Amino acid sequence: MISSRLLGAPLRTRTLLGVARFSSSSSSHIASSLETYNLPKPKLFIDNEWVDAENSSTMPVHSPINGQVISELANASSKDVDLAVRSAKRCFDDLANGTGGWPGSPPADRALVLDNMASGLRSRMEEFSHVESLDCGKPLAESRADIEACASFFEYYADLISKGGFLTAERLPCPEDGVEGRLLREPVGVVGMITPWNFPLMQAVVKVAPALAAGCSMILKPSPLSSMTCLMMGDLARDAGAPPGALNIITGGPPGPTNDDGESCGVALGRHKGLDKMSFTGSGPTGTALLHEGANLLRPTGLELGGKGAMVILDDADMDTVVDWAMIGIFYCTGQVCSATSRVVIDESLADEFCDRLAKAVAERLVVGDPLDVRTNMGPMVSADQRDKVLAAVKEAEADDRCDPVLEEPSASIAESADAGGYYVAPQIFRCKRGADGTWPKAWTEEIFGPVLSIGTFSPGDVDEAVSITNDSPYGLGHTVFTGDEARASAVATRLRSGVVWTNINQALYPSTPFGGCKQSGFGREYGELGIEDFCHHKTVISAKPGFSWGWYGA
Ligand code: NAD
């Protein structure tokens, strides 16, 4: 977010390499960051106030850097969820009450709040970035890029609703004299938002910014694995002028202990009847569960789910740049990116050279270790569970004769970081091919959500085969095509079934460019004008002048 049939193709032999050494003690970096920056208290943000969970239940927050408990989170019960939903509903009901309130306020007033949030974020850039890195293990440079992007999202939507007049009524042509039509974009209502841990603040902001711009009120529930910066957004919103109830932030599982009532915070929010819409980003199984809840209530549900993106490299691609783009596609955020290009689909004639260059680049340029050390460009996984899932997938690939590892065993640096209790994994690259029965290995077909790249080839010059291999996936989120010929790039882009296609670039997204998936990667769009449409209720108003009549029954 800053992303062939192999039968008969010879598998490469293993390339030996190491990654740069783990450079300094993570404990000292953590200690100094914790001394400099305050982490949020284990409270819920409801009605612009910080409150305890009703049963005072909390859960520990571990830093992925060394596994240390760095803080606690409030573990919201169903009653807390209900309080948050009621707060958002009170805020939204001002519209129907005729008092206007937040949902009925002039868009320019809401734009001011969004602009204030952007300024607040920029003025606390280092604090937000350090807390993000401590909490989810991102290298500082990535956290800074995320927080900068979050500020830009607030500004983009502020700009869209003020200067662009996006929310101004649209005239609808009506073919009858004396009759006029208008399309109004009104806020959809009270929105539940459930987000994952990989881009903690950003995944929330791409929902919160357009929803606030539209005039919605909301309840945000971030992942318990990385809720810190989302909680910090509470003060940001209140200080920016958001009224009580416009943005409520609650924390809790899953994963984590359920409450006395047996429901975790996320499940209780997903089931709450007071929501007008659910907007979810995360895994397919959770998306399916929330879609079922939404179906029972006939409530719209937006889903941004997983992916198994491909980087298609045609025979005329620029080999000097593709390696860097391939690394961004799989090592950025330690591969925990829904649109990661975790498959490389490459012309067989280039495959050996590509593997050599990639292995060399990993050895020379990938620095795995403490994310608070500025030299690091790949941090740990977010949790011990996620690390173990990735290690299990790697073990399975190593045992599969359709996969051949390109890199050596985990380097000393990874072992040292792991000894420090952090959730580190080594980068892994496999050459993959179909088996005799025509099937691909799991490393090729399933989302691993870690720094594990699978490389497969297509017959020299056979673009049809490249397209067919790429599209042969249940997912459709982000693919990219590299070729020296722009017309060829566009032609391939139109044939790929995916919500986003890049050509000669990878993972680039901007506030104005819609993002979302097709197939099992979900539906609905975030970012851009489509991103705010998802939080709008479209009302058609057809009007005639007083006294107008059809005289249908002779009046
Ligand atoms: P997850 O589905 O386990 O959790 C996401 C959120 O849902 C968390 O806040 C969690 O607490 C909550 N949750 C979990 N179970 C729930 C339930 N039954 N009811 C209500 N809430 C529940 O996903 P994750 O492990 O946090 O994230 C990884 C997955 O998310 C990957 O599959 C990845 O591809 C996907 N993802 C997609 C995008 C995208 O934009 N398409 C972005 C990031 C991550």
Image (tube, rainbow, N blue to C red):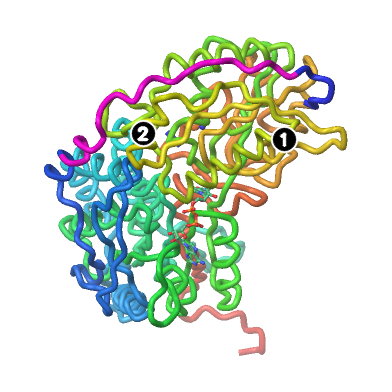
Q: Is residue 550 left or right of residue 87?
A: right
Q: Earlier in the sequence, mark 1 or mark 2?
A: 1
Residue 17 included in the magenta stretch of the image: yes
Within 10 angstroms of label 1, few (less than 14), some, or many (20 or more) residues? Answer: some
Q: Quadrant of the N terminus?
A: top left
Q: Secondary structure at mark 1?
A: loop
Q: Is mark 2 within 8 Å of ligand 1?
A: no
- Decide: is 383 above or below 177: above
Which disc is residue 94 wearing?
A: none
Q: Say left or right for 438 vs 397.
A: right
The image position of residue 540, as x and y in percent, is 51, 67
* Dots 1, 2 in contact, CB < 8 A: no
Q: Position of residue 190 (x, y in %)?
A: 39, 70
- Residue type at mark 1 is Asp
Q: Which residue is mark 2?
A: 417
The image quadrant of residue 28 is top left
Query: Magenta span covers which residues?
Result: 11-31
